[in-house]
Image: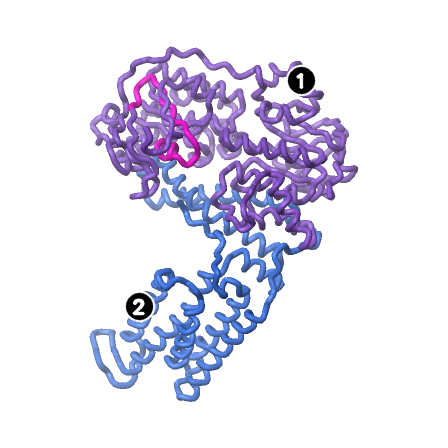
Amino acid sequence: MTADLLTPTAGPQLIYRINPVAKMAAAFLIGLGVLLSIDWVSASVALACESVLLFWAGVPPRRLAIRLSPVLVGAVTAAFMTALYAPESGASYLNILFAHVTAGSIELATATFARILAVGVPAVVLFLTVDPTDLADGLAQVLRLPARFVIGALAAVRLVGLFIDDWRSLERARRARGVADRGRLRRLLSQAFALLVLSIRRATKLATAMEARGFGSSAPRSWARPSSLHRADVVLMLIGALIAAASITVSVATGHWRFLGT
Amino acid sequence: MQPRPVAVDARGWGWRHADRPGFAVSGLDLRIEPGERVLLLGASGAGKSTLVAALAGLLGDEEAGEEIGELRVDGRNPRDARGGVGLVLQDPDSQVILARVGDDVAFGCENLGVPRDEIWPRVREALDAVGLALPLDHPTSGLSGGQKQRLALAGVLAMRPGLLLLDEPTANLDPLGVAEVREAMAQVLDRTRATFIVIEHRVAVWADLVTRVIVLSPGGGVLADGTPDQVLRAEGARLAESGVWVPGFEPAAPARDRGATGTPVLEARGLAVGRERRVVIREGIDLTVSASRTLAVTGSNGTGKSTLGLTLGGLLPPLGGTLDASAIAGGLPAEPHRWRSRDLVSRIGSVFQDPEHQFVAATVAAELAVGPKAAGVESAEASRRIDAAVERLRLGHLLEANPFTLSGGEKRRLSVATALVTRPALLVLDEPTFGQDARTWRELVALLSALLDEGSALVAVTHDAAFVDALADDVLSFDLPVGAR
């Protein structure tokens, strides 16, 4: 069975009651603090603070580890490449063809590793604990994004799960019709086109169903689920701002700050 | 609290879709009084769905088509009465809008700007009315077809419409789902006074719940109008002929000589099936499929019937046991899933539940040519077979049409024709009669019966009891709990 992308995300922990908009804002603030400077200190400070916060996130460690693994792989790969191929500076440790590991490149590699994690961890936690419906409510009611767009997008996301089933079905149907042996590329292209046609038909049907329930009319919309910012939301955003401030301050104070890598 | 039932008036009304040359509906004169309960019938192409879409205010403006005459809901243009009219459509999957049951029902109320304090009591009342006793935060994704249709009905009821429209609400449901939706609707009609119009080609489902039957004529206007008894007595035979399922006028199935003893084509012993590797849905299946015989596989949804069909059709690998088709393999390995696609197509034909999945060409003619070409059938022979299939399945006037633009019955006929032209020894059909009108049903059963006489073997995965009665020599029922055999 395919995973339904819109299966409600819920849990007893505080983090599931935080407004998704506040979580996004906090992640954004932390990310901003980390991205402004390419150095290992600011990113490490942010990462350290985040690890403390992770205890409250309430995501089972196993699940977190699985979801974090791609980020970790990416961070290690990027760090490794940086160590080998970054511009040389300082003491040289290793020289093979184009690969030069120097003191400078190792420092840059550490910074790269820490930065990817510092941005990736909040993003993964966000992804794991935000319910799409709640996010749409927040975007429309707190950030005042156009309801027609936000709700339309939310309804469309639900169709993605069906596309996966459609794709498999198309694959089997092509085999049954005798055309599954020909060139892989050609087959994929024709199948992708068929999926596009099916998707548009599904989307049209969904749009009709939504219109039939009054969606898209000019009447002002009401909201069955209120979405607003409460004290806990403000506190989380403040924590985000504090982490950003702390990472910048420590980095500047220790002389590691390099604004946008300059 | 109760919505005020509204009247429907049509005066010389007609509509032509912008992309079609002829009018879908024309010359319609009609008055439906507030609170009337109407079953809307008519042959395929008589414009029933167009009328219902118009009443729901969904037809669009001059760009979408040409309108003549006047159509009024509650004395107003239906486009301005949206929200006062509730519509439930045919496809359960494309009517679920949000991820949680409560949110989905609340969606219409939100769009109407109903105050929040009022929305949730309405949601609970609507769910109660359709008998959907689920928590408000229950995910909508796992619901059955019947539950999804009741959910859509609840979403419409919560809007408190004065006019309730149902466009073939049970056509895509299994018998259990049909009964569920009918039961829910009966309960709803006990509580509401709303005007009610339902399109359905199975008359028996709604005959007891409606007070009036209106039959639209494909040539425009109204063919018959009156109480269910009057109309069905006077028009029953003609309606049945045009494809409507009328009680007492069920389509006749050709007499078959049962119990032919054909040679075995395919044998399964201890077969385990599933769609993903290592995820067995059903195991321990023993069956033999023989020439000139039909094996019907029946049972509730989710019991693995379709998965078995795909496995027998060589489209999924068996997950255990043996599957032996060496009688028709012609030197290839015994298991069909190991054959190449082009070898499969001339040995086992598969007809999917949703014909749209099977179409790979831009015209009906090209669609029919795909299979023979893949199988390497010499072209004179291929045209001969295609001509025969076209003749037999009345596709001649559609050869240049795009398969996706055909009606439901035409799509089904085409998908069967594409499987026939490669002359497979075994034909596997998944719900071949699902959502089909009586005429297509009759033709399909006659065709399959003829194929059996010619020596083909059939496997049909089906919920349709009449189909089983008409054709099945052997029945494999999946309703018994696994391991209870």
Check residue A132 for magenta coloring. no
Colour scheme in use: by chain
Q: Residue furthest right?
A: B75
Q: Which of the pair B94/B345 is nearer the observer?
A: B94
**Chain coloured purple:** B
Is disc 2 in the same subunit as disc 1? no
* Helix, strand or loop under label 1: helix
| Residue B241: quadrant of the picture | top right
Q: Where in the figure is residue A140, as x and y percent of width and height?
A: 60, 60
* Helix, strand or loop under label 2: helix
Boundaries of the magenta span: B288-309
Shown colour of chain A: blue
Quarter of the figure that contains the N terminus of chain B = top right
Real-space Cα separation, disc 2 to disc 1, in angstroms: 77 Å
User: Is A160 left or right of A67, judged from the image as shown?
Assistant: right
Instruction: Give the residue displayed 66% in from the left and 33% down from the top.
Output: B189
Q: Chain of mark 1?
A: B
Check residue B290 for magenta coloring. yes
Which residue matches tag 2? A77
Q: Where in the figure is residue B50, as x and y percent of width and height?
A: 64, 33
Q: Which of the pair B60/B9 is nearer the observer?
A: B9
Q: Where in the figure is residue A91, as x and y percent of width and height?
A: 25, 85
Look at the image and tell me whether residue B400 can be seen: no
| Residue A117: quadrant of the picture | bottom left
Instruction: Give the residue displayed 41% in from the left and 19% down from the top.
Output: B448
Which residue matches tag 1? B229
User: Is A72 left or right of B199, judged from the image as shown?
Assistant: left
User: Is B7 left or right of B239, judged from the image as shown?
Assistant: right
